[in-house]
């Protein structure tokens, strides 16, 4: 019997529904399971109930932005790796996200989703 690797689970935290859907579709085609939260508050509620192998995080969101979310992960000692995908292209935003624990930072307008999915594969394998 071949040993089947469990599907890696990714939490997509993204308030723009078309972007969230696109990430979900591409990750699904790459063999990942994903779930979407449309802001940091919902994402924390999901993380309280389920474990994920990786979090894809937008920074500009209602109710709780990505920076607050990263700080809250630290407060709650949640060690799930986070890759930020944001429309914020300032160097200080990337530095702040990484200082708060993000392992990588991609500017959405500069990075095709396929490239981000490839990077996710490298991180999780």
Image: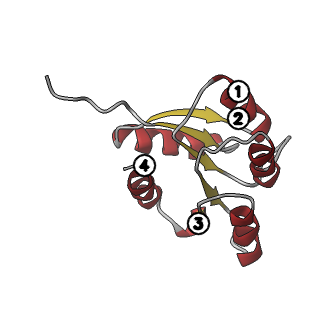
Q: Is mark 2 in CB contact (under 8 Å) with mark 3?
A: no
Q: Mark 4 — residue?
A: 124
Q: Mark 2 — residue?
A: 43
Q: Mark 3 — residue?
A: 109
Disc number lying in front (2 or 4): 4
Indicate how the structure is coloured in the image. Answer: secondary structure
Judge by depth and name the residue closer to the eye, 58 or 15: 58
Q: Earlier in the sequence, mark 2 or mark 4?
A: 2
Q: Earlier in the sequence, mark 2 or mark 1?
A: 2
In this rendering, position of residue 37 left or right of residue 33: right
* Residue 48, horizontal then vertical, whole percent: 70, 27
Disc number lying in front (3 or 1): 1
Q: Is mark 3 in CB contact (under 8 Å) with mark 4?
A: no
- For the N terminus, give its image quadrant: top left
Disc 3 element: helix
Q: Residue at x 35, y 43 (%)?
A: 30
Judge by depth and name the residue closer to the eye, 75 or 9: 75
Q: Which mark is residue 48?
A: 1
Mark pair 2, 1: CA separation: 9 Å
Mark pair 2, 3: CA separation: 23 Å
Q: Earlier in the sequence, mark 1 or mark 4?
A: 1
Q: Earlier in the sequence, mark 3 or mark 1?
A: 1
């Amino acid at each position: 019997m071949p040993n089947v690797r469990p599907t890696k689970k990714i939490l997509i935290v993204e308030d723009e529904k078309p972007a969230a859907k696109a990430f979900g579709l591409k990750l699904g085609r790459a063999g990942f399971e994903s779930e979407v939260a449309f802001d940091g508050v919902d994402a924390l509620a999901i993380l309280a109930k389920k474990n994920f192998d990786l979090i894809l995080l937008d920074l500009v969101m209602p109710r709780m932005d990505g920076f607050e979310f990263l700080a809250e992960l630290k407060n709650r000692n949640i060690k799930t790796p986070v890759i930020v995908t944001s429309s914020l292209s300032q160097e200080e935003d990337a530095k702040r996200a990484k200082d708060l624990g993000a392992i990588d930072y991609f500017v959405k307008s500069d990075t095709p989703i396929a490239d981000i999915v490839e990077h996710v594969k490298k991180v999780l394998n």
